[in-house]
Image (cartoon, rainbow, N blue to C red):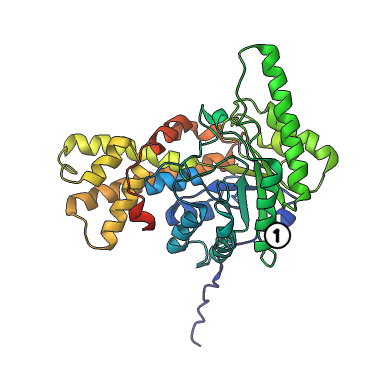
Amino acid sequence: MGSIQEKAILLPSSSSVRSLLAQNNGRISLCETHNRTSTEIIRNAVGRGGQTFDGIWYSGLCQTTYLGIPDTEIISPLQRASLLALNGDLKRTTNNRALCAAFDADSGGDMADIPALVGLLSLIGVGMIIIEDKAISAPGQKINSLEDTSGLQGQADMHEFADIIRAFKVASSKRDIMVTARIESFTCRISKADPNEEKKSCKRALHDALQRAKTYREAGVDAIMIHSKSKSPDEVLEFLREYRVGDLHTPLVVVPTAYSETTKETLYTAGANIIIYANHLMRAKIKAVSSISEKVLAQNPDLFTDDDEARACIEARNYGCLLRKLRERSYWGEESKEARMYRIVAETCASENIEATVNDLLEGELAGCEADTRIISVKELLKINAQQVAPVAGLVG
């Protein structure tokens, strides 16, 4: 008798955020991805205790770093989604487990773009769209929430933002997409020097966040994200607990980048449903490639002497964008032998460090600080991102 070979069963590579929340007792975790390699590392990673990530996060900060432009909404959410669609990594089939996906949609973009944005993200396989309630009137005006100057941004009028939520809900009415409001009351607050004034300011910000959450829920939002740049989790925990007094069911999202020494269990117990590790893999890539680049360029200082694009990336330490550019040249057969050798070594080091970082995040009891020795700081990433090393016209022209 001839042997029977089993064929690999290919499954859709994306899953629903809503369905995974139901399957996992209302607790899931997502990890930032910025290219196909990082997505597959997340998909395949299993901690020593069997831990896995449930999905991926398309971060605005990390995607713009990868593209070589500042995270100021200099290109629209629709344009960013279009670039993800061209990459097309999530909608492919897989013989491994499916991942859910959430997309950082900044302020949501122009109202006229919302139907196309939602439709495109649905095609990509995104199951959650997160929009932030910042006051942004023109492209390039956004200030990242983790910047020291984020208090200068100001928030959108909550009722006008509720109209944006309604527009997203209409556009997603026949799709399995969760529209999520990202509340920036804490990050847009300006700290006070006087302790008593600071306490009052924090209390006002909490009241504002709770009022916005109520307004956004009435507008039909499916989930709420509360953001903070404080190293202490106190304001986030207080919001979670107070919100849960009146609403036990709406999924709540947290991003503990700043307060990463908090335990995951503390956040879940307080009322969080989704924990997002928002930028760790780009930080891991830059840390690894920065180290190897110093060694390679010390031995071969003329490697990129006549390459203005590569030199700009190296000077800015934006190795995420550099590797993207080198990979694209390789695809088009425009890569020198020396550059190819550098790219292969750099990509290998980056992948190894990303994989180790993912395992640290999975296996740790805390909310991300276990990987700190493998990654650059958030402040370093923000500084790198602020330096534009690629023309916008070359991306969306």
Q: In this view, does 169 lie to the left or right of 78?
A: right
Q: In this view, does 188 lie to the left or right of 393?
A: right
| Residue 355 % position (x, y) | 46, 46
Q: In this view, does 83 lie to the left or right of 182?
A: left
Q: Mark 1 points at which residue?
A: 19
Q: In which quarter of the image is the C terminus?
A: bottom left
Q: Which residue is drawn at 44% across and 43% down?
A: 282
| Residue 56 % position (x, y) | 55, 52
Q: Which residue is drawn at 50% across and 46% down?
A: 60
User: How many marks overall?
Assistant: 1
Q: Front-most of 157 and 245?
A: 157
Asked if one can make out residue 100 in the rendered structure from this viewpoint, the answer is: no
Tell me the SS state at disc 1.
Answer: helix
Q: Residues within 10 Å of mark 1 (few under 14, many from 20)?
A: few
Q: Is residue 119 above or below residue 73?
A: below
Q: Is residue 135 above or below residue 46?
A: above
Q: Residue at x 59, y 63 (%)?
A: 115
Q: Front-most of 80 and 367?
A: 80
Q: Is residue 383 above or below residue 352?
A: above
Q: Which residue is drawn at 21% across and 44% down?
A: 308
| Residue 314 % position (x, y) | 28, 39
| Residue 4 % position (x, y) | 52, 81
Q: Front-most of 254 and 284?
A: 254
Residue 303 falls in image quadrant: top left
Which residue extends farthest right?
A: 246
* Kind of residue indicated by mark 1: Ser
Residue 274 falls in image quadrant: top right
Q: Front-most of 15 and 388?
A: 388
Asked if one can make out residue 163 in the rendered structure from this viewpoint, the answer is: yes
